[in-house]
Image: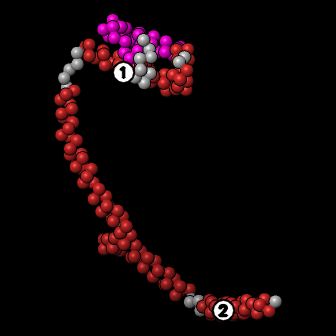
Amino acid sequence: AKEEISIQPETFTPQKEVPAVAETSLSDVADIETKIPPKEERTKLWEKLQESYTSDKKQKTVSPTIEEELPPTIEEPSAILQEEKFVETPSVELEAEVKPEEIPLVKEAEEKPLTEKEKIEKEAKRLARSLVKDILLYHSDKVEIGLKQGNLAHLIGNEIRKSWRFYKDNFPLEKTGNVNYFKNALNEIIGKGKQIFK
């Protein structure tokens, strides 16, 4: 109880000092407000203020020294970041310099014209792989269950038949030299390299 009594007077003493400070500042403001210059002086002051404002504005736009002095103080952190970027860029440029040398070699190998048979083979493989990947993408759960239980043909047989018809319409076996690239893609992608489809 004694501690509470000793604390209470300390909290009240600053509150008494604060209004006294406020009263003195209000009296100072009242003195300032009473010293208003006459109308003519106010208009002259206003004109001077406008002139100084416009002259300051012109100096800021015309003089390059002010513009040059401000950016370094503001952009010092970004300058450090730019230096770090310059350190990283040479490695990228070196890689870019190496790549153009390699690209012509690859282009020379690809510039050899493919025969008609090779073009058909390439397109047939691409179509077969994309059809099988679509089956795997849209029916991955059935494929996993079918591989575990051994009833893959029962679970995704319809999808395989639809894709096979589409493949056969575009690339009949006579066109691909009796090579079934669709079956190869099924064994490679869905069968994971095992000869499930015969």
In the displayed structure, does residue 10 sit left or right of residue 109?
Answer: right
Residue 102: image x %, image y %?
20, 38
Residue 74: image x %, image y %?
38, 69
Q: Earlier in the sequence, mark 2 or mark 1?
A: 2
Closest to the observer: 152 or 21?
Answer: 152
Q: Kindly indicate the quadrant of the structure image that contains residue 9.
A: bottom right
Closest to the observer: 52 or 75?
Answer: 75
Q: Kindly indicate the quadrant of the structure image that contains residue 21.
A: bottom right
> Which residue is most to the top?
174
Callout 2: SS: helix
Q: Quadrant of the C terminus?
A: top left
**Which residue lies under the disc numbered 1?**
126
Q: Judge whether 161 appears above or below 110 on screen.
A: above
Span shown in magenta: 157-184
- Tell me which amino acid carries mark 1: Arg
Q: Label 2 to label 1, Cα distance in Å?
A: 88 Å
**Which residue lies under the disc numbered 2?**
21
Residue 124: image x %, image y %?
35, 16
In the displayed structure, does residue 166 sit left or right of residue 26?
Answer: left
Which residue sits at x=20%, y=40%?
100
Q: Quadrant of the N terminus?
A: bottom right
Q: Tell me the mark number nearer the camera, choosing from 2 and 1.
A: 1
Q: Is residue 139 something one can see in this rendering?
A: no
Task: Please say whether residue 160 is one of the residues in the magenta stretch.
Answer: yes
Q: Kindly indicate the quadrant of the structure image that contains residue 55.
A: bottom left
Callout 1: SS: helix
Q: Is residue 20 something one can see in this rendering?
A: yes
Label total for image = 2
Which residue sits at x=30%, y=8%?
177
* Dominant secondary structure, magenta: helix
- Tell me which amino acid carries mark 2: Val
Point out which mark residue 110 bears: none
